[in-house]
């Protein structure tokens, strides 16, 4: 049986962490609360001054004239609009400023975690976090913190006013209503709504991830005639998401109904108590009207609180996921102010590595490479070749042994310097839906046109680019669909040449191309012999023809051929 996902943190902890992000914007939140409280009191003032007029007509001793009472009521209405505007402006200003900060923090966290930790994450879940989860948190900042504070302040003011004007018995009825609607009902509802909200967010993220994978792999689905099976699964997941949505909405509706019932009950109770006080001679009819009208109009802020659990369940689930990412530790910590080195050679001694400290991936690896050499590493798929290259870039922390560039261990080299001097071209080159020129400039944003063309000539792709209708200005299409696998790999190689790194690590650079394109790529690499140090990883023996020395990886061990 599938277990329901649970929050890692309590709702209070999530709220506290989200509030801490306010920082210097806290004063704007205070301003929003003040404007909101005064605005709601002004809204009450419209009906309250009407009640004052009725009380005056009933013979209550009120010094204000009818004209003054009407003027005050109109003024309250005007002020309500102005204060409401500033309250909403302040809340949304904070919300959108913080959303920008959160997005920046998330992208910063992803940059730190990438690429090691992200290899095991679903891209659709990350997209859902950056878009839907962040937008959900906007509700918390704009429609949660401020309403809670406003409800407390307004309820306290009304309690004191009703007690002073109409007696503390009527004020006690109002207070009991505030506590029931603003605290008891939300607490009772939060347990049920919390579970449904977490299930919904988990199902939503799962559906996003699966649907994104389906879109990215639609070509293979069509070629393998698997469209119907995939469509059925998408529909099934969509139905599961719809079911969770209905459950959540049903729970919210029941909470709303309970709130409305309680409001009606306490309004009736206030009226009954007021009539009783008048009948018993303990309260005049005019003061009773003022007190009861004040109670009637004061439930708005606490009703807003009672509606929060439905939104807060989404907020807590979204906030929990965002806080998880922000708190996640990278596989390795970047090295700052590391030891300088010249990257003249590479020496690997007794290197071992395992992902979970139990199952070894690489054992006692030894390799040497001099500047200007082409070193080949061959082995079957899954033997650890790609992992070895990632260890050279310190994407993962080695378990034991040494990786030395120019005599300095990789753990002591400044990370920026390492990534500047060592570049890796993966077996799948990702191209953004931009022009070829813009995709190349990822490696060197300030590159001149001459530098772009020189790098593409070195990668034997310049002539192909010129043959396109718009040359370097040609858009590659979503996911690079306008280019073949070989063309994308050669553009990836051009990126590496453009970056100017002394060491280039090539992970299966010819795995997705035919023999003709393989020959073109290998010729381009051979032309760089003596200029660049190249580690060439492949499962093809033919690719090793250009290598100065060859190492074979088998069962996690490496031997020189």
Image (cartoon, rainbow, N blue to C red):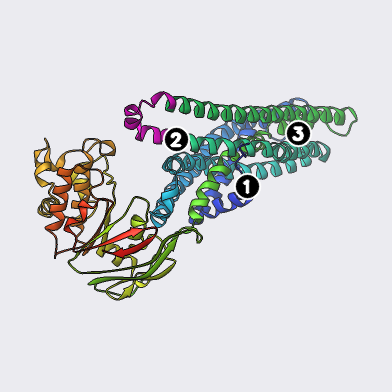
Q: CA distance from mark 3 to mark 2?
A: 58 Å
* As drawn, 343 above or below 172: below
Which residue is located at x 33 percent, y 62 percent?
A: 393
Residue 219 lies in the magenta-colored region: yes
Q: Quadrant of the C terminus?
A: bottom left
- The residue where tag 3 is placed is 291
Decide: is 113 above or below 50. Answer: below
Q: Earlier in the sequence, mark 1 or mark 3?
A: 1
Q: Which mark is drawn over residue 285? A: none
| Mark 1, other Cα within 10 Å: few <14 / some 14–19 / many ≥20 | some
Residue in the image at 62% along x and 29% along y: 247
Give the spatial CA distance, label 2 vs label 1: 29 Å
Can residue 456 be spotted in the picture?
yes
Q: Position of residue 200 (x, y in %)?
A: 56, 35
**Comes first in the chain, label 2 or label 1:** 1
The magenta stretch is: 211-229
Q: Residues within 10 Å of mark 3 (few under 14, many from 20)?
A: many
Q: Secondary structure at mark 3?
A: helix
- Count of numbered badges drawn on the protein: 3
The residue tagged 1 is 11
* Residue neighbourhood size for the residue with mark 2, other residues' Cα within 10 Å, grouped as few (<14), some (14–19), many (≥20): some
The reply, left or right, for residue 150 in relation to residue 128 is right
| Residue 70 occupies quadrant | top right
What is the secondary structure assignment of the residue under circle 2?
helix
Q: How many angstroms separate mark 1 from mark 3 (CA)?
A: 36 Å
Q: As drawn, is 80 to the left or to the right of 352?
A: right
**Residue indicated by mark 2:** 210
Whether residue 198 appears in magenta in the rendering, the answer is no
- Residue 445 visible in rendering: no
Above or below, 182 relative to 106: above
Of 21 and 54, nearer the camera is 21
């Amino acid at each position: 049986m599938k277990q329901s996902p649970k929050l890692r943190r309590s709702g209070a902890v999530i709220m506290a962490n989200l509030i801490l992000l306010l920082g210097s914007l806290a004063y704007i939140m205070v301003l929003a609360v003040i404007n909101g409280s005064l605005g709601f009191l002004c809204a009450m003032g419209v009906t309250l001054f009407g009640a004052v007029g009725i009380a005056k007509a009933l013979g209550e001793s009120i010094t204000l004239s009818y004209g003054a009472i009407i003027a005050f009521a109109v003024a309250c209405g005007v002020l309500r609009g102005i204060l409401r505007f500033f309250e909403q402006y302040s809340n949304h200003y904070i919300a959108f400023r913080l959303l920008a900060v959160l997005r920046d923090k998330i992208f910063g966290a992803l940059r730190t975690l990438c690429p090691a930790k992200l290899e095991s994450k679903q891209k659709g879940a990350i997209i859902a976090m950056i878009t839907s989860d962040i937008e959900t948190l906007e509700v918390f900042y704009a429609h949660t913190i401020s309403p809670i504070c406003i409800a407390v302040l307004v309820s306290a003011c009304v309690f004191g006013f009703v007690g002073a004007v109409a007696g503390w018995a009527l004020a006690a009825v109002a207070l009991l209503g505030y506590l029931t609607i603003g605290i008891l009902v939300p607490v009772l509802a939060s347990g049920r709504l919390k579970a449904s909200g977490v299930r919904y967010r988990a199902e939503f993220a799962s559906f996003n991830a699966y649907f994104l994978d389906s879109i990215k792999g639609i070509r293979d689905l069509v070629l393998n005639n698997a469209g119907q099976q995939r469509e059925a699964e998408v529909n099934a997941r969509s139905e599961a998401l719809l079911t969770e949505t209905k459950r959540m909405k049903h729970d919210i509706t029941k909470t709303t109904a309970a709130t409305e019932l309680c409001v009606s009950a306490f309004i009736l109770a206030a009226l009954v108590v007021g009539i009783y006080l008048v009948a018993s001679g303990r309260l005049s009819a005019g003061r009773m009207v003022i007190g009861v009208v004040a109670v009637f109009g004061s439930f708005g802020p606490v009703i807003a609180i009672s509606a929060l659990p439905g939104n807060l369940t989404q907020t807590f689930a979204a906030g929990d996921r965002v806080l998880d990412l922000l708190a996640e530790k990278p596989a390795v910590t970047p090295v700052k102010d590391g030891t300088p080195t010249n990257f003249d050679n590479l020496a690997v001694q007794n290197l071992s590595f395992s992902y979970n400290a139990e199952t070894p991936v690489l054992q006692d690896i030894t390799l040497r490479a001099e500047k200007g050499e082409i070193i080949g590493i061959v082995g079957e798929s899954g033997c650890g070749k790609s992992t070895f290259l990632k260890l050279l870039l310190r994407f993962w922390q080695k378990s034991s042994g040494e990786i030395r560039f120019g005599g300095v261990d990789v753990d002591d080299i400044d990370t920026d310097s390492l990534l500047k001097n060592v570049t890796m071209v993966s077996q799948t080159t990702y191209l953004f839906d931009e022009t070829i020129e813009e995709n190349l400039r990822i490696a060197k944003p300030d590159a001149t046109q001459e530098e772009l063309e020189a790098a593409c000539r070195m990668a034997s792709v310049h002539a192909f680019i010129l043959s396109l209708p718009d040359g370097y200005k040609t858009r590659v299409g979503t996911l690079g669909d306008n280019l073949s696998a070989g063309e994308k790999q050669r553009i990836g190689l051009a990126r590496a040449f453009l970056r100017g790194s002394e060491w280039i690590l090539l992970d299966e650079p010819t795995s997705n191309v035919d023999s003709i394109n393989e020959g073109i790529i290998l010729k381009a690499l051979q032309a760089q012999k003596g200029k660049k140090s190249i580690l060439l990883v492949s499962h093809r023996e033919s690719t090793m023809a250009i290598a100065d020395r060859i190492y074979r990886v088998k069962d996690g061990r490496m031997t020189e051929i």
